[in-house]
Every structure is written in structure tokens, then in C-alpha cells.
Image (cartoon, grey):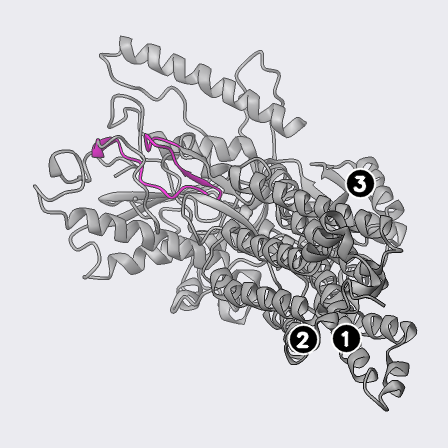
Amino acid sequence: YPVLLYLHLCFYLFLISFLICFSESLLLSQSCKLLKRFYLNGMHKPGDVILGGLFEVHYSSVFPELTFTSEPHDKMLCVRFDPPGFRHAMTMVFSIDEINKNSNLLPNITLGYSLYDNCATLGIGFSAALSLATGREEHFLQENCSGTPPVSYFATCSCLSDRRRFPSFFRTIPSDAFQVRAMIQILKHFNWTWVGLLVSDDDYGLHAARSFQTDLAQSDGGCLAYSEILPWGDNPKEYERIVDVMRKSTARVVIVFAPRMHLVELMKEVVKKNVTGLQWLASEAWTLVDGLDTPAFMPYLGGTLGIAVRRGEIPGLRDFLLQIHPNLHQNNTGWVEAGGALCTGQEDLENVETDFLDIANPRPEYNVYKAVYALAYALHDMLQCEPGRGPFSGHSCGSLQRLEPWQPVCCFDCIPCSDGKINSMECTSCPEDFWSSPQRDHCVPKKTEFLSYHEPLGICLTTTSLLGTFFCAVVLGIFIYHRSTPMVRANNSELSFLILLSLKLCFLCSLLFIGRPQLWTCQLRHAAFGISFVLCVSCILVKTMVVLAVFKASKPGGGATLKWFGAVQQRGTVLALTLIQAAICTVWLVSASPAPHRNTQYHNDKIVYECVVGSTVGFAVLLGYIGLLAILSFLLAFLARNLPDNFNEAKLITFSMLIFCAVWVAFVPAYVNSPGKYADAVEVFAILASSFGLLVALFGPKCYIILLRPERNTKKAIMGRGNTKT
């Protein structure tokens, strides 16, 4: 890409210049001498401490012809004055003047400034950054050609979070990683799972694209239909190709990480091809910029959702801006358009409609203001240090004469990254997904935790689940093979088969709780668990009711009772009770669906992947309905426990329901107090324990008689007459 090639070229030119500077410094009595001055637009004010700033006062430039065979003689010209950019620069001047007037902040210390126009051009911005880092005097104050780098107030690129590459970079605006996560949350909120991504061809856009694709894959929030890079400069054919991709795609949501100039060119092509019906998501670079809310663009951009930089109030800024006028005696700013008339200083700005005075919604300005004050307070704290009680080596203090970047410490969650040598410490907060290494010298990815198939706990639970499924299959096979025997026929074989099938599903659904949480597993696990157990318990409930009906029918005049408990009525009751649970699950999934979640609150050094239930009420209703059916079955079976021995099915049901209720009563407090993967393990254990309890209590004695005591598997024995002679 042209910009990247140009960046590399600038880097190599800078490296060559540095080597030349270093070589000549050895020849010039070990001092560093400035070989060439850059032609830069700037404003300067002397002071005890100089703060540097780069601002986009012009948003375009005219380059001289570069042959790379001889030194260019013409300077680069900055054109197209940008009033908001100049306002940002003046905000820094205002902040410094306000601090200098404050007797309680940096007393006896005067702040100065060096402000440069970067002209929205990489080469000019790079030259300005070098000037800020090294100075513009013929001889540097420091022999090693080094100086204090500036602090950026408005750089969101996540690439700048690398502390090894940028040790003196401190943020006063969130990284792009935060707005990437915010956009993914917006996508998940509206259930937009098929989106397009457009980014600018620079570090801002490319790093945002990489972060977005990574986070989107991890969150299971959706998929990218396409990802396109917007070109720099005049390239209508490329914009035409990109808009054609958008028009042909079925994705109706478009996310754009790019500055205003890209959006203007893109929207011209969108209007030309009449691409309507798109939902746009804007990054902070173009959310609130002027020039896009035109009558031509609004039919296409209306309804755009965007991430905006935080705003704040700056008292007195407007009055300060109204007082600004050119200094006719010391006008070295060079910020005058070619051919334009120089202001006299007598103009009344308050009656002029200009973007320069538009501070009704100060967002970048607020970050300039915060950046200057952050530096001022850091310097103030450093100067308040008492010798012998300082934070550096030997409890020493920093000084303005030898100020090092690692001395502007201003972080909200400080993690020492050194080996105990305080003077070499870079105190910084690792990114959210990283943690300090054991040596505390760099950031390493956090460990991830979830109930895995590869750890002992997960292997044990998986094995138990598969064993339970196998035992259900074996019992089902035994019952099918012996289906004509009195033991199977007398115990309502159809309901017995349904119970075995539902228990098999209960054992299998526990596998959904093991492994890294995905969107589909989070949604399916509780629905499958809830419906499977209701199917099982409703069969047991109907079976209990049949037992009571049969006993009542055996008494004189009770024959009419059985007509309400025929095969059709039994199936209908089981189906109706199960459909109620299915309806509960459906409402839960539609209204507040469970979803995977990356939890960083349990442990600072690891990321816990878990499924959040979405709606606690939905989960409670699901469990409560199962509990209601279980308690009802237990009560009915308990009432029928003293029936004659030929109806001893009620005793087995009573015992099985007692086990079932005991397991799930113990489950609730254990689940609430178990963090992360252990909550999943507790739920799996409850599923397996209750399933085994039902399987053993209901079918263990029957299998024992069928397989080991066949003499008791007769109609006489089951009817209570045993071997009595007829």
C-alpha cells in the first residue's frame, strides 16, 4: 500500500539521518549537532517545562517533486485550513495558560509549549515529531540526541498499547479495542449476525479490523460477509468496486473504521449507485464530524449508530478563543493560507459564523484538556517528592533537569513489570486479555478456564455421562427383550420405555455443559436439560396416578376410575406437561437467551468462559416447574406407599423422588456459591446424580428380578399369591 511504503521509506531515511547524526557527533567533540531544520508551521512559548503537541491545523499538503537523487529544495506546503484542528491546538494553549495562572499547581514552575501542524500528512507529522523529540536548536542540550517525547491526547489505535515499542505513550482516550467491543455488543443486542466491515488503509483501520475479527470470532456474535480496505487518495475505481461488493452482499449492516475523508468519497459512490437499506455503524473518527449530514447523504446515512468520544465541559474556553488574534510583531506560525489576507486583529469573532468557535459539544478538546492536566499533575507530584522517600532507585526522586518518561507514572491499575529495580520500572496496566509474566517484565496472554474435556474433572464427568447412557440402553434392551413377561407388562411398559428414553437424554444433555461455551451450547443446554427431566418426571407422575387409579378400581364400585387413565389419556397428560416446559424454554430463549461470556472478575490473571443464563427468572421458572412435578409425584407416591405388595411400584417411586428432590435441593446453594467452571461441574453432577438415582431406584429391583430371580417374574408372584396352590 502506498502509505505503508511511504512509512517504511520515512523510517529508513530517519535511520540514515540518525546514523549520520551519530557519526558526526563523534567528530564534533561528542556533541549532537542539528544537520537540517524542517520547515514546519508552529507556535512556541518558552517555559521551565515544554509540552509538545501535534495538531491537524491543515488537512492537506502539496509535496515538492521527490527524485531521491538530490536533496529537495522546496518545502512541503500545508493547504486547506481546518478550524476544528486549530481549535484543538488553541485548547492546549488555553490549558497551559490556565495551569500557569494556578498558584496551587506547579508553583514556581512555568509550562511552555511547542505546537506543530501535521497537515494530516505522514511525512510532515513525522518531521514534527522528530523536532519535538530533539529540539530545533543548532546544538542539543543532551549529547545523545534524545529528548522527552510528546504525549498524545487523541490516538485511539490499539497498536500503541505495546509498552515495549512505545514506553512513554500514555492514553487519555480509550483504545480502539474498547469501541470494537462496544460495537460487538450492539450487534449482539440487535441480533445482527451478518455484517460487512470497511476500514481505512492505515494503522487505525487495519488494527481495528484485526481486533474486530478476533473479538467477533471469540464472542460468537456473528460473521463477516466481507471486509474491505478503503483506499487513500483519488481512487474512484476502487470505491466503485467496494460499493458493488456492498450492493451485491446480503449483509445489511456495515461497520466503518475510517476518517471523514474516506466516508465522503464512499458516500458519493453509494449515492451514485443508490445503495439503500443499509444500517451503518460508525467509529469515533466520523460519528460527529461535519459534512456528512447533507441532504444528499442523509437518505442513506439516516439512523446511523456510532461510538463517540467522551465529552466534558471546559469553562472559559470560548472566551479564550474569542481573544485570539494574530501577533503582528512575532507572527511565526505560518498558519495563513497562500494568497490570503492577514487578519488585523480587530475582527469581531463573536459575530462571525465559524467552526472555530463551535464548542457546544467539546469532545477532542476535552481530551486535550485532560492530557495537559494529567502531565501537569504528574509533574507536580514528582516535584513534591522528598529525597530519601522517592519511588526510584535508592528512594531517590526525579528532577526536571533529567526527566525520563518512565518517571508522566499515571495508571489506574499499576502492575510492576520489573525485577525489583525501580529505576528501570515501566509501571503500566496490561491489556484486558493479558497479565504480567512471572518475571514481571512483559505482558503475557491470560490463561483461559472452562470445564474442558481434557482436564480430569471434565473427563470424569464425561465418562460418567456416557456410562449412564450405556446403562439406560442396557436396561431398555432388557425390557424390550423381556417385554412379554409379567414384570414388564404389569409396570406399564410404555411409560417405562418413555422414562428410560428420557433418562438417556438427561445423561446426554450433561455433555453440553462440558467444553468451551458456544452460543448454541449455552442456549441448548438448559432447554435440553429442562425438557428431558420434565418428560421423565411427568411419566413418573402419570405412573403414580395410574397406580392409585388401579388400586381404587380394585375396590367395589371403583371400576369407572380407570376410564380416565387409559393409554390415550396417559400419553396426552405426558405430552401436555412436557409442552408446558417447552413453552417456558421458548419464552426464555426469545426474551433473554443464555449466551457465552468472558468473565474477568473472578480472577485477575485468567479469563473464565461461562454461559450467563440471560434471565434469572427464566432459569428459576424452568427449575421450579421440574421441582413442582417432582414434589407432586413424591406426595402421591408417598400416599400410596402402604398399598398392598402387589402395588409396590409406589414405594419405588417414593424412594426415587426422595433422591431426586434431595439432589436438587442441595444443588441450589452449591451452584450459587461455585464460580466459573465449577458452577457447570455442580450442575452436571446434579444431573448425573439425579438421573442415576431414578434409574437405580425405579429399574434396579425390576432388572434384579428379571435377570436373577426369574421364578418371581410370574403373574402369581406379581399378584401377591406367590407359589400358592390353585
**Residue 662 x, y percent position in the rendering:** 54, 66
Residue at 29% x, 19% y is 32
Compute the Cα span from label 2 to label 3.
Answer: 74 Å
Q: Secondary structure at mark 3?
A: helix
Q: Which residue is mark 1?
A: 547
Q: Which residues are magenta?
A: 421-442
Q: Amino acid at mark 1?
A: Val
Q: Quadrant of the N terminus?
A: top right
Q: Residues within 10 Å of mark 1 (few under 14, many from 20)?
A: many
- Read off the residue under disc 3: 239
**Where is residue 496 drawn, in percent x and y?**
79, 61
Q: Residue at x 83, y 36 (%)?
A: 237
Q: Are marks 2 and 3 in contact (CB under 8 Å)?
A: no
State whether the magenta stretch is mostly helix, strand or loop. Answer: loop
| Numbered disc 1: secondary structure | helix
Read off the residue under disc 2.
637
Q: Identify the element where label 2 is drawn.
A: helix
The numbered mark, 2 or 1, whose residue comes first in the sequence reads 1
Mark 2–mark 1 CB contact (< 8 Å):
yes
Q: Is residue 290 visible?
A: no
Judge whether 437 appears above or below 474 on screen: above
